[in-house]
């Protein structure tokens, strides 16, 4: 007997039901391997979450850019959320810089480890494989997302997004929105894809991809990855100390030439080698082992980095470095030179680098140095790695790329209506925001989880399959 139609329908229903269940609630959770570098994913996950926070807050609270007490305590500069370090929880632009440092660290860790072991043939093969797969890994999820956005535009789900984002109460900064056209939408879409996808464009901006503006960083990631691998390849056979010195010199040179993004990537490579130096001189902080899902709290302590080999002075030292990085990353975009805690630092920085029209030194000086210090402090301290190796942090790290991809289109399509609905109920500005934000966050995490399983993870496997098919036998 053949398969009955009812059986087929029920089979599809079961598949759809399983797909709609978030991975952290699924009964068929895949085992995960606990690695010493899980903290990198955790850092990336929280950074993606804070970018989401930023894109929710920026259109609604324009005072987020103002430094605390920069005007003597008026209604725009006396919010507790404007204080240093607290500001990091919604400082999206700084989190993007952190992404670049983490990417430079991640993509060079294995090549540098092989270089230190003298395995230059394996190093070459690793770089060939990584270079081949990088564009596919970065662009495939984005292109899938952009096609989805285009389809949603045709379905009319973006008809009011532009008007809503530019009307009260959305009076702050917001990302570009796709223009809904009566005709020529597909041609406009292809034109923006063409401009956006250029990895050699040195001035990539969100406006180049209004269909999903946050994706401006993806071509930058590809360009900087290639630059960083070129630096690693060129210095692969040098002595480790000399290699670290020259790599750091490249990072400083790029920064001095105002090539901020390559500078952060190459700085990440320096941090990766420093991490390898630390790992070689101490016992592994985590023993690789099989673990269940990120939200399986059983035997959770075994998954966290061990701090037994770390002295108290080391913990204080790297804790101070981490805190300094958070402080520097809190430099406000408006009124920074007068904000609480900043005048002396700004005067010192301005002495060497001058001031802009607002009287501030180049803001990227503080935020770039801060991003590097954050990753350095965490990578050197098992104690600091623990918060970023928890099940929650690892889950956010797993879906971080998907979260970064989908959050802005969801905000354009649903978020502005969501915030406006709760405000118009008369619950008050801040309470309405908190309710709407909670709903938006839950919706975005669920969508990110599905996007990860349907698009992001298969993209990684597809890139590897293509490489295997095209590789010389």
Image (tube, rainbow, N blue to C red):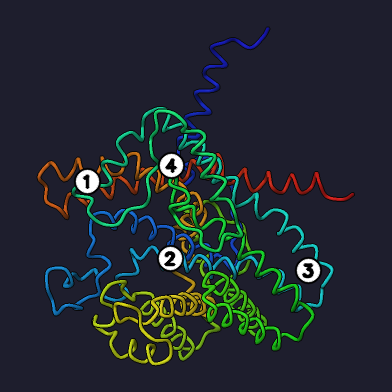
Helix, strand or loop under label 3:
helix
Tag shown at residue 447: 4
Instruction: Please determine whether, in this image, residue 186 is positioned above or below residue 111.
Output: above
Tag shown at residue 167: 1
Q: Residues within 10 Å of mark 1 (few under 14, many from 20)?
A: few
Q: Earlier in the sequence, mark 2 or mark 3?
A: 2
Helix, strand or loop under label 1:
loop
Circles 2 and 4: CB atoms closer than 8 Å: no
Q: Residues within 10 Å of mark 4 (few under 14, many from 20)?
A: some
Q: Earlier in the sequence, mark 2 or mark 1?
A: 2
Q: Is residue 302 visible?
A: no
Image location of residue 44, percent across then percent down: 49, 62
Helix, strand or loop under label 4:
helix
In-image side of 279 versus 100 (left or right): right
Circles 3 and 4: CB atoms closer than 8 Å: no
- Marks 1 and 3, how far apart in space? 54 Å
Q: Earlier in the sequence, mark 4 or mark 1?
A: 1
Residue found at x 38% / y 61%: 50
Q: Quadrant of residue 91?
A: bottom left
Q: Residues within 10 Å of mark 3 (few under 14, many from 20)?
A: many
Quadrant, the N terminus: top right
Residue found at x 34% / y 88%: 345
Q: Earlier in the sequence, mark 3 or mark 4?
A: 3
Depth check, front residue: 218 or 279: 218
Circles 2 and 1: CB atoms closer than 8 Å: no
Helix, strand or loop under label 2:
helix
Q: Residues within 10 Å of mark 2 (few under 14, many from 20)?
A: many
| Residue occupied by mark 2 | 95
- Marks 4 and 1, how far apart in space? 27 Å
């Amino acid at each position: 007997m053949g398969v009955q139609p009812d059986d087929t329908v029920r089979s599809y229903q079961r598949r759809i039901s399983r797909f709609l269940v978030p991975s952290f609630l699924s009964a068929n959770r895949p085992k995960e391997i606990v690695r010493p570098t899980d903290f990198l994913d955790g850092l990336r996950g929280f950074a993606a979450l804070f970018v989401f926070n930023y894109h929710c807050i920026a259109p609604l609270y324009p005072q987020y850019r103002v430094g605390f007490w920069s005007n003597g305590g008026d209604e725009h500069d006396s919010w507790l959320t404007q204080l240093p370090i607290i500001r990091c929880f919604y400082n999206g632009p700084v989190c993007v810089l952190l992404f670049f440092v983490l990417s430079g660290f991640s993509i060079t860790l294995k090549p540098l480890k092989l270089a230190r072991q003298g395995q230059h043939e394996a190093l070459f093969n690793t770089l060939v494989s990584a270079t081949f797969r990088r564009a596919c890994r970065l662009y495939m999820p984005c292109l899938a997302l952009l096609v989805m956005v285009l389809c949603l535009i045709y379905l009319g789900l973006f008809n009011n997004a532009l008007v809503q984002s530019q009307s009260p109460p959305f009076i702050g900064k917001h990302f570009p929105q796709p223009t809904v056209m009566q005709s020529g939408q597909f041609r406009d879409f292809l034109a923006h894809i063409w401009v956006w996808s250029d990895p050699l464009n040195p001035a990539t901006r969100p406006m180049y991809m209004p269909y999903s503006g946050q994706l401006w960083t993806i071509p930058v990631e590809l360009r900087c990855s290639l630059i960083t691998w070129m630096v690693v390849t060129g210095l692969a056979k040098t002595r480790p100390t000399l290699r670290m010195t020259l790599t750091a010199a490249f990072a400083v040179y790029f920064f001095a030439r105002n090539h901020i993004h390559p500078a952060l990537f190459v700085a990440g490579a320096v941090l990766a080698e420093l991490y390898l130096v630390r790992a070689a001189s101490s016992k592994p902080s985590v023993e690789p082992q099989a673990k269940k899902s990120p939200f399986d709290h059983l035997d959770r302590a075994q998954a966290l980095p061990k701090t037994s080999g770390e002295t108290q002075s080391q913990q204080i030292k790297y804790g101070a470095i981490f805190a300094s990085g958070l402080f520097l990353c809190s430099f406000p975009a408006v009124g920074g030179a007068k904000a609480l805690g900043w005048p002396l630092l700004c005067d010192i920085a301005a002495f060497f680098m001058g001031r802009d029209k607002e009287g501030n030194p180049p803001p990227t000086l503080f935020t770039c140095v801060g991003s590097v210090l954050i990753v350095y402090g965490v990578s050197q301290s098992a104690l600091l790695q623990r918060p970023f190796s928890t099940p929650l942090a690892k889950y956010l790290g797993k879906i971080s790329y998907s979260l970064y991809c989908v959050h802005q289109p969801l905000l354009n399509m649903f978020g502005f209506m969501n915030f406006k609905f709760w405000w118009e109920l008369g619950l008050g500005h801040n309470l309405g925001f908190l309710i709407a934000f909670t709903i938006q966050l839950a919706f975005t995490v669920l969508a990110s989880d599905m996007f990860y399983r349907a698009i992001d993870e298969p993209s990684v496997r597809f890139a590897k399959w293509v490489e295997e098919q095209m590789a010389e036998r």
